Amino acid sequence: AQTVTQSQPEMSVQEAETVTLSCTYDTSENNYYLFWYKQPPSRQMILVIRQEAYKQQNATENRFSVNFQKAAKSFSLKISDSQLGDTAMYFCAFMKQQTGANNLFFGTGTRLTVIP
Amino acid sequence: EPEVTQTPSHQVTQMGQEVILRCVPISNHLYFYWYRQILGQKVEFLVSFYNNEISEKSEIFDDQFSVERPDGSNFTLKIRSTKLEDSAMYFCASRDRGPTIYFGEGSWLTVV
């Protein structure tokens, strides 16, 4: 079974500063995907970034980047130049890479507050 | 940009009543999902659906739950006899052959 652990229930950051959210996971799979989803107060789940386990290069999307350490099974999210709109719950998620429907396994989330 | 749409956004129902949550996945997507999030908790997988049948279901998805894709467009989740503990946000999601799952805005179900 896959488990995803987010050890930081809450974090805060000053506007324009950088913050890193932690995520670790446990799996016996070699091929998989990792995701960060954002859930603002509107409750919608929005994809932030995706990482393929077979890629050594860390994914980046504008101000969002990840530090993927496959051996350590660690997948942290770095948010640079934090903006007020980044205030949200952030969920780390895992998906096996295989044929079929494949579902996501989520962590418990980190509530991020950006302070003006 | 295509998106997953869900109705209703919020429903209040009495315990024991049947509820149907509706979803229109992104056109041409192949895989469909329902997830649940009890307030303050993590998002939990309920069921996945592909090629007009259930691919996988979790322990939560018991006989009270069913899914249907009646017309090639809509994807519904039915809860036959709601319980208080069914109160949650229900997310519909879909994906094509790629790995990214796209979520709808959720249907908030309150059972009283």
Image (spheres, coloured by chain):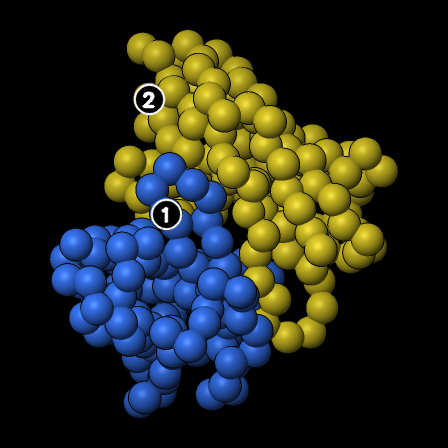
Chain colours: A yellow, B blue
x 38%, y 78%: residue: B66
- Residue at position x 49%, y 77% in the image: B49
User: Can I make out residue A76 in this image?
Assistant: yes
Quarter of the figure with residue A112: top left
Which residue position holds label 1?
B38
Side of B97 where A39 appears, left or right: left
Q: Left or right: where does residue A109 sit relative to residue B67?
A: right
| Residue under the point 46% across and 22% down | A10
Q: Is residue A51 visible?
A: no
The C terminus of chain A, quarter of image = top left
Q: Position of residue B76 (x, y in %)?
A: 32, 76
Residue B41, image x and y in percent? 42, 41
Amino acid under disc 1: Ile
Q: Are marks 1 and 2 on the same chain?
A: no
* Towards the viewer: B35 or A62: B35
Q: Position of residue A77 (x, y in %)?
A: 59, 30
Amino acid residing under circle 2: Leu
* Residue reaching furthest to the right: A71
- Numbered disc 1: secondary structure: loop
Front label number (1 vs 2): 1
Q: Rounded to the nearest whole Å, what is the CA distance between mark 1 and mark 2? A: 26 Å
Pointer 2 residue: A84
| Secondary structure of residue under mark 2 | helix
- How would you rate the neighbour count of disc 1 (Cα within 10 Å): few for under 14, some for 14-19, many for 20 or more? some
**Residue B93 numbered mark, or none:** none
Compared with B56, A4 (above or below) is above
Q: Rate crowding at label 2 as few (under 14), some (14 to 19) or many (20 or more) other CA atoms within 10 Å.
A: some
Instruction: Determine the chain carrying the residue at label 2.
Output: A
Q: Position of residue B39 (x, y in %)?
A: 33, 42
